[in-house]
Amino acid sequence: MNRLVGTALGLLVVFAFGVWLAWSHVTDATLVALRYATNLADGHGLVFNPADYSSVEGFGSLAWTLWNALFAVFGADPVLVAKVTGVALGVLTLALLMRAVDGSAAVVAGCTYVLFLPTFFHLTGGLETAAVALVVLRMAVLGMRVIEERHVPDFEPPLLLLLAATLRPEILLAVLPGFVVWFRSRRFSRSARAGITVAVLLAVGAFVWTVVQYGHFVPRPVADVFGDVGLNTAWLGATLLVFAPLVLLTVGLLTWPELRGVGAFFCATVLAAGLPYAMRVDLADDDLHRYAFAMFPVLCLAAGVAVSAMTGVRFVQAIVGFLVVGWVAVTGALSPDLASTATMGVDLKRTHEAIGRGLAESDVDAGSRSVAVADPGVIPYYSGWHAVDYSGRNDAMITDGARPDGVVRGAQPSVIVVPSPDENIPDNVSGLDVPVAVAGYSQVGPFQARDGSWQFVYVRPEWANQVEVAVRAAVARGEEQYGNDYEVTINRWLDSVRR
């Protein structure tokens, strides 16, 4: 068994351990997408509520939602499918990194990817993050092969372009350099033109469907990303700090004459991948460098190529490779939001999922099962109730400018769930005047999810007893299973893993 195979097997062991550590992780946004996927699988269409006649594009990734819906049709658990898919894509990414280059380049690229602790939370979180990173990396590998005058299948670049557009539209910029490099070399090929034609037709079809389904020309995910344009120095600084040696080595490729073309291509890909996020002022949900993760495998690959080019003195290769891998591993483990992200899955299960399951189990008439929420993922998903998302992302009326107060009052939900940073009832959440909205409702709870996160549950009087009994019982089961430690710390995360 040669040294590279042994390294790969060792990395797979570390990879499996990392997946085990992060397996409990899930986000509220994950369950939003899976609610759309479940409704589609049940024949209701891509809607937040089965009875929505004025739908809104509240999911972040069309391709990811459709993928999960495919398995939901056959009765598979969408949460498990999303997590297993993410892990499988992570394995493919590692394999691609170690097969795209040889020797020390493969070792540095693979070790950097696997020893970056946030990798495993992005793989197990159930979002499209792993798929996006793999698509960007694959296009970068194809572009590198074209520059090195190696064969590239004509069907792949157009397919990757289409996948990027439907996974996360702004990632089109990241795969564009690779597509341009390929197209310049294959523009006279019939098979290449055929692939491009098919991809364009499918993209136009998806665009037309979006306009017909949701009534707008700009997909909601694109509007979200490019809504408030301006230099995000905080995101840029945090990203450069974590990936500093990778960025330096990628730029350093420009100093080797024989690697200047590949280096320029890698630099263009990384810049294109980061530009949409560096230019958005109010970027949210970027836990553990989630958006920068799209370019991370490409940076790993470029750094590996740079280290392998240091052929003069072998120990220099080893020192530089060790420093690069060590820097990324340490900065990843020291990420300020690691504790918050690592404990999120347990906290959502213990409280949000418990509230949702309690609502599902409560003896409330089918026609009265409606809940208003500011966090539209976990509670609506596990309750199965009709949900009013007064944060606005999944409500067509609020998206079109209606005030949350008016929407909630008009819906008259049986339950209103209000998040709070402490045990005090907030005056306003996402534009909802809480005291006015819950007037006449009975209070159940509040229920603590973690330090700095509480859930107040308000129920219409006629259903107060049924809901309180079921929800309190479900939350009690959650606390029994996951404990009643609410500190947001690394130690609590490790304790929950050992439990």
Image: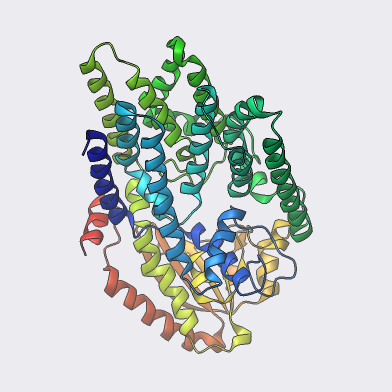
329 left or right, relative to 392: left
Q: Quadrant of the C terminus?
A: bottom left
Residue 376 on image: x %, y %: 55, 64
On-image quarter of the N terminus = top left
Question: Does residue 491 show up?
Answer: yes
Rendered view: 327 above or below 387? above
Q: Count the numbered circles shown.
A: 0
Asked whether 103 or 478 is in front, the reply is 103
Q: Give percent across and percent down for residue 359.
A: 49, 80
Say which residue appears at 57% left-offset and 34% top-offset: 174
Foreground pick, 190 / 214? 190
Q: Is residue 1 above or below residue 59?
A: above
Q: Which residue occupies 33% across, 73% down? A: 478
Q: Quadrant of residue 432?
A: bottom right
How far across and down, in percent of the image, does residue 477 sit? 32, 77
Q: Residue at x 67, y 63 (%)?
A: 395
Q: Does residue 376 appear in this view?
A: no
Drawn side of residue 346 relative to residue 27, left or right: left
**Residue 410 place in picture, x, y as percent:** 71, 73
Q: Is residue 230 left or right of residue 111?
A: right
Q: How is the image coloured?
A: rainbow
Q: Looking at the image, which residue is at 43% across and 68% down?
A: 352
